[in-house]
């Protein structure tokens, strides 16, 4: 690991300016630094300056989370732990608190930030291993195609088969979240437009422009919402399939639904077919609920070792729906 400088700007605007400063060969933003540290240790990145925005809050922002005028506002530098323990947020949008509280370990949640979670790089072991010159590092091969791929994508055409690593992205998406920016001509970007598929640019995952810095995220309240992840182990593990759900209810009947899958595609994966199938379903009617959620894996193209995700995804969706309606899942009853 080479030497590097650390800069501590007092505003996001100043941080943005530093990223464009030609004095530096490579300037990298640092908040919690969890993913960044992995990249430094793995030799995947070689910055000459780290721009520390960990303690920067946008002018006027006092709290990590605020709800006003029917809009939820989450500061970019809010930690996952702050999100997970916000009683106000758990009432207004439980999916956000559940997604944050389900991520990683308590130690990581105390450091990792919301913006960092949204923008973290993929966890593919070929990408993370410096010895593999994979597509995402400028090589010519996705080693997962003929290699170990049990944690890789079952949706998407490739050519890279990563899964998107963020818990917070699908949870915010079901609330029609907007990412607010500084450092360019645009001030905001719908979260649904933040990410792109690998065939649109295999060496990156997001559509941020050079110099753009996320200041905060807004979304609508989702009182009937939930996140559910299936993991190999419950502590400090990545989901093999997960779902974020927000529903509108008339009694026990679903009148509308928003459903986004996680850990199954290179981007958070919308499930509009499930949304349509859930409309009119009584959550107490388990047969109808199972039937609606069973189509979650339609169109999946599993690889040699990850076909189990086709069976896991409908389970995650159904349990997220039950949880969003205030009903216990099998493992919680």
Image (cartoon, rainbow, N blue to C red):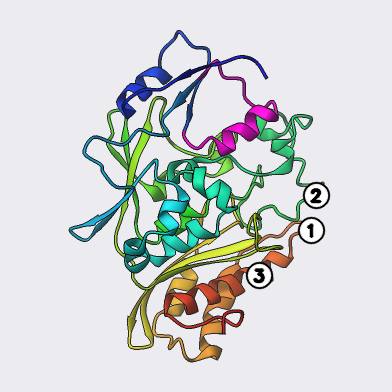
Q: Position of residue 214 (x, y in %)?
A: 37, 37
In the displayed structure, 45 sits above or below 285; it is above
- Residue at image point 43% right, 88% down: 282
> Could you tell which of marks 1 and 2 lies nearer the N-terminus?
2
The answer to whether marks 1 and 2 mark residues whose Cβ atoms lie closer than 8 Å is yes
Camera-side residue of 239 and 209: 239
The residue that mark 3 highlights is 312
In the displayed structure, 120 sits above or below 151; it is above
Q: Classify mark 2: helix, strand or loop.
A: loop
Q: Classify mark 1: helix, strand or loop.
A: loop
The residue that mark 1 highlights is 305
Near mark 1 (Cα within 10 A), the count class, few <14, some 14-19 or many ≥20, is some
Camera-side residue of 304 and 166: 166
**Magenta extent:** 31-49
Q: Position of residue 308 (x, y in %)?
A: 73, 67
| Residue sitting farthest toward the top | 23
Q: Position of residue 49 (x, y in %)?
A: 51, 17
């Amino acid at each position: 690991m080479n030497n590097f400088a650390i800069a501590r700007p007092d505003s996001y605007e100043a941080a943005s300016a530093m990223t464009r400063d030609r004095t530096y060969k490579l300037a990298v933003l640092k908040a919690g630094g969890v993913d960044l540290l992995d990249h430094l240790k793995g030799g995947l990145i070689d910055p000459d300056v780290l721009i520390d925005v960990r303690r920067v809050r946008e002018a006027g922002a006092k709290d990590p989370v605020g709800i006003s005028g029917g809009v939820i506002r989450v500061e970019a530098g809010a930690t996952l732990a702050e999100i997970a323990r916000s009683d106000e947020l758990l009432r207004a949008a439980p999916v956000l608190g559940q997604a944050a509280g389900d991520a990683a370990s308590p130690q990581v949640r105390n450091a990792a930030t919301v913006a960092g979670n949204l923008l973290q790089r993929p966890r593919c072991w070929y990408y993370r291993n410096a010895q593999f010159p994979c597509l995402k590092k400028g090589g010519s091969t996705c080693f997962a195609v003929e290699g170990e791929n049990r944690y890789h994508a079952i949706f998407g055409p490739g050519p890279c088969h990563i899964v998107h690593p963020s818990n917070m992205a699908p949870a915010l998406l079901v609330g029609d979240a907007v990412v607010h920016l500084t450092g360019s001509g645009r001030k905001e970007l719908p979260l649904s437009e933040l990410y792109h598929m690998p065939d649109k640019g295999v060496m990156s995952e997001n559509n941020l422009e050079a110099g753009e810095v996320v200041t905060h995220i807004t979304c609508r309240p989702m009182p009937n919402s939930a996140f559910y992840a299936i993991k190999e182990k419950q502590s400090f593990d990545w989901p093999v399939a997960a779902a974020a759900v927000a529903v509108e209810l008339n009694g026990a009947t679903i009148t509308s639904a928003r459903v986004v899958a996680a850990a199954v595609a290179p981007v958070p994966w919308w499930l509009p077919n499930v949304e349509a199938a859930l409309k009119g379903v009584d959550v107490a009617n388990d047969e109808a609920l199972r039937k609606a959620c069973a189509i979650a894996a339609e169109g999946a193209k599993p690889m040699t070792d990850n076909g189990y995700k086709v069976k896991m995804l409908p389970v995650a969706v159904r349990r997220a729906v039950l949880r969003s309606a205030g009903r216990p899942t099998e493992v919680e009853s």
